Image (tube, rainbow, N blue to C red):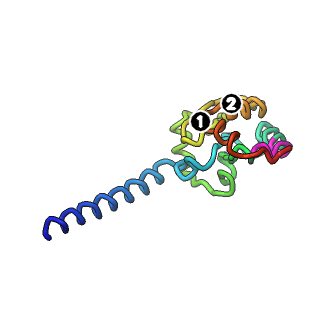
Amino acid sequence: MKNIYQKLLSIILFLGITAVSNVAMAQNNPLEAYRWHNRLLLVFVPQIEDERLTKIQQTLNQVECEFQERDLLLGVFTSNAPSRIGNDSISSYQEAQLRAKYGIKSNQFAVILIGKDGQSKNQLSEVPEIERIFGQIDNMPMRQQEISNRSNSCN
């Protein structure tokens, strides 16, 4: 009987350590919550009024359905306005973590495509052509599977 209790205690400790580890990982990686759920298009701009951000937002408004069809969320990071990914606020600490991770200074412009696996797929220093981003996503194995499993609702 004592052996069963020891095994049960070991399992409980393992599950507790795993849960704490997962919470710590999510705190250390602001993108962890989106992993396996969304692709991210992260836009880093010096100021919210940056014309490159405006151009990206205008383009995305024109292709909103295609953007959503690919499970994409837009992240905007700037020093003079609250940073966000989709509808979620990103703290200045989390923004600093991301800037450090991708080597982006506060006065730089950058666009980063993050796959559902949480990995960077592309990093650009200019406004991307959205069709090229969509093409890159559509060639990803996970997206190929999504295409075969669901109908295109944007036609």
Residue 7 visible somewhere in the drawing: yes
Identify which residue is drawn at 23% across, 65% down: 9
Pinpoint residue 34: horizontal percent, then vertical percent: 58, 50
Q: Could you say where residue 75 lies in the image, as x and y percent from the top left?
A: 67, 46
Q: Is residue 82 above or below residue 117?
A: below
Read off the magenta span. 60-68
Describe residue 27's horizontal placement relative to residue 19 as left or right: right
**Where, quadrant-wise, is the N terminus in this rendering?**
bottom left
Judged by its main secondary structure, the magenta piece is helix
Q: Residues within 10 Å of mark 1 (few under 14, many from 20)?
A: some
**In the displayed structure, does residue 111 sit left or right of residue 50?**
left
Which residue bears the numbered disc 1? 105
In percent of width and height, residue 78 lies at: 67, 45
116 or 125, which is in the foreground? 116
| Residue at 61%, 34% in the rendered image | 141
The image quarter in which residue 43 lies: top right
**Which residue corresponds to mark 2?**
136
Q: Is 64 within the magenta? A: yes
SS at circle 1? loop
Query: Does label 1 or label 2 sit earlier along the sequence?
Result: 1
User: Alpha-carbon neighbours of circle 2 within 10 Å: few (<14), some, or many (≥20)?
Assistant: some
Q: Nearer the viewer, mark 1 or mark 2?
A: 2
- Amino acid bearing label 1: Lys
Quadrant where the C terminus sits is: top right
The residue that appears at 68% across and 29% down in the rendered structure is 125
Looking at the picture, which amino acid does disc 2 mark? Gln
